[in-house]
């Protein structure tokens, strides 16, 4: 491939956050109100604590109100459900995010289902999953929504393209399949039981790797001129690497996302956008 374009997730994310902050400012002048995001953390997982801190900081930068709730690791499920009910009832809260993973004694699906679907800015509630798979307009999970935003930013056409997704998780693989299908791609999802995965991957115009295996995608799995989106975040010898063997892939792809600095920064930008959208719907704006 002669010309390869690196997809700059930091740049796209910064631009989306700028738009969200500008619209928030305008709506505040118009209504006197700002979007509110509640982030609930149970336990002391250090990685989760960093994510929550970043979310609160980004909320402040957007002009949002943030509600941070940190509960002890041994908090009972009913206490957590009580907090969610309070947040559901609070009109100043437009988005509720329960940081995953939750401690093992808590039934995570039950907690996610307790969030009001209108405030489910993660797009994980079964009602919103249903809306997404039936082609409607609900909040889409943030990482997949971020992938579509990157493709659009770089004016990469989706309609009619062969899209192959490696991975079928509920947070990445399945929702990105629904979003690409909604945009009229022909979509194939691969997983651990797929036969001859390299051959399927080679048929892709748009290849999304979301399996969590360092450098799994090698050049023999990529068609010349394909768009390669690497969702994987893996730590190898203290370094972050994706699911794509980036150094080797660069030769073949027309567009490729690096790790870090590709898909990663998009998730938080789309969380802010989903929260702004929930605020607008709640206030008929
Ligand atoms: P997950 O829930 O662990 O799912 C992994 C998927 O990959 C499963 O569907 C699994 O197939 C499939 N898989 C695993 N090994 C395979 C193999 N050898 N061949 C074919 N398929 C294989 O993962 P996830 O939560 O979607 O996350 C995937 C990666 O994305 C991780 O590295 C994660 O850290 C990263 N991630 C990044 C962001 C972000 O950038 N903001 C957000 C979310 C996730 P089966 O279903 O058959 O087991």
Image (cartoon, rainbow, N blue to C red):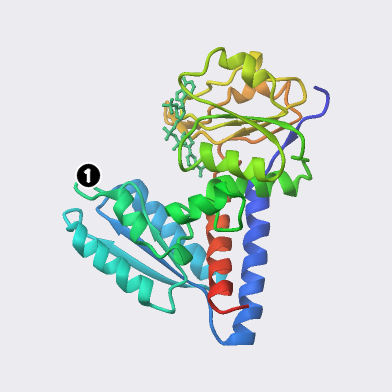
- Image quadrant holding the C terminus, namely bottom right
Residue at 63 percent across and 23 percent down: it is 247
Residue at 56 percent across and 46 percent down: it is 133
Residue at 26 percent across and 63 percent down: it is 81
Residue denoted by label 1: 104
Q: Nearer the viewer, residue 279 or 26?
A: 279
Image location (x, y in percent) of residue 221: 63, 17
- Mark 1: few, some, or many residues within 10 Å (few <14, many ≥20)? few
Q: Nearer the viewer, residue 54 or 67?
A: 67
- Image quadrant holding the N terminus, namely top right
Helix, strand or loop at disc 1? loop
Image location (x, y in percent) of residue 158: 74, 40
Above/below status of 255 relative to 142:
above
Above/below status of 18 relative to 212:
below
Is 114 left or right of 271, judged from the image as shown?
left
Residue 57 makes an appearance in the image: yes
Image location (x, y in percent) of residue 182: 66, 45
- Tell which residue pokes out farthest to the front in this image: 134
């Amino acid at each position: 491939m002669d010309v390869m374009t690196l997809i700059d997730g930091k740049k796209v994310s910064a631009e989306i956050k700028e738009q969200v902050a500008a619209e928030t400012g305008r709506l505040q002048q118009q209504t006197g109100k700002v979007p509110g995001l509640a982030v609930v953390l149970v336990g002391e997982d250090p990685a989760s604590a960093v994510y929550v801190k970043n979310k609160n900081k980004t909320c402040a930068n957007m002009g949002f109100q943030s509600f941070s709730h940190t509960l002890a690791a041994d908090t009972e499920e009913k206490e957590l459900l009580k907090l969610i009910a309070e947040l559901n009832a609070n009109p100043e809260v437009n988005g509720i995010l329960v940081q995953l993973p939750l401690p093992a004694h808590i039934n995570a699906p039950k907690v996610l289902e307790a969030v009001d679907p209108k405030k489910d800015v993660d797009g994980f509630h079964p009602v919103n999953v249903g809306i997404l798979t039936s082609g409607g307009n609900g909040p889409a999970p943030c990482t997949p929504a971020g992938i579509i935003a990157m493709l659009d930013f770089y004016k990469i056409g989706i309609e009619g393209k062969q899209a192959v997704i490696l991975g079928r998780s509920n947070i990445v693989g399945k929702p990105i399949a629904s979003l690409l299908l909604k945009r009229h791609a022909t979509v194939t999802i691969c997983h651990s039981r797929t036969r001859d995965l390299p051959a399927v991957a080679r048929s892709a115009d748009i290849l999304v790797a979301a399996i969590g295996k360092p450098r799994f995608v090698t050049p023999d799995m990529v068609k010349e001129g394909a768009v390669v989106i690497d969702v994987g975040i893996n730590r190898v010898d203290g370094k972050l690497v994706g699911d794509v063997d980036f150094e080797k892939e660069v030769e073949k792809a027309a567009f490729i996302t690096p790790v870090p600095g590709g898909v990663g920064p998009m998730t938080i930008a789309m969380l802010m956008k989903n929260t702004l959208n929930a605020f607008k719907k709640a206030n008929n704006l």
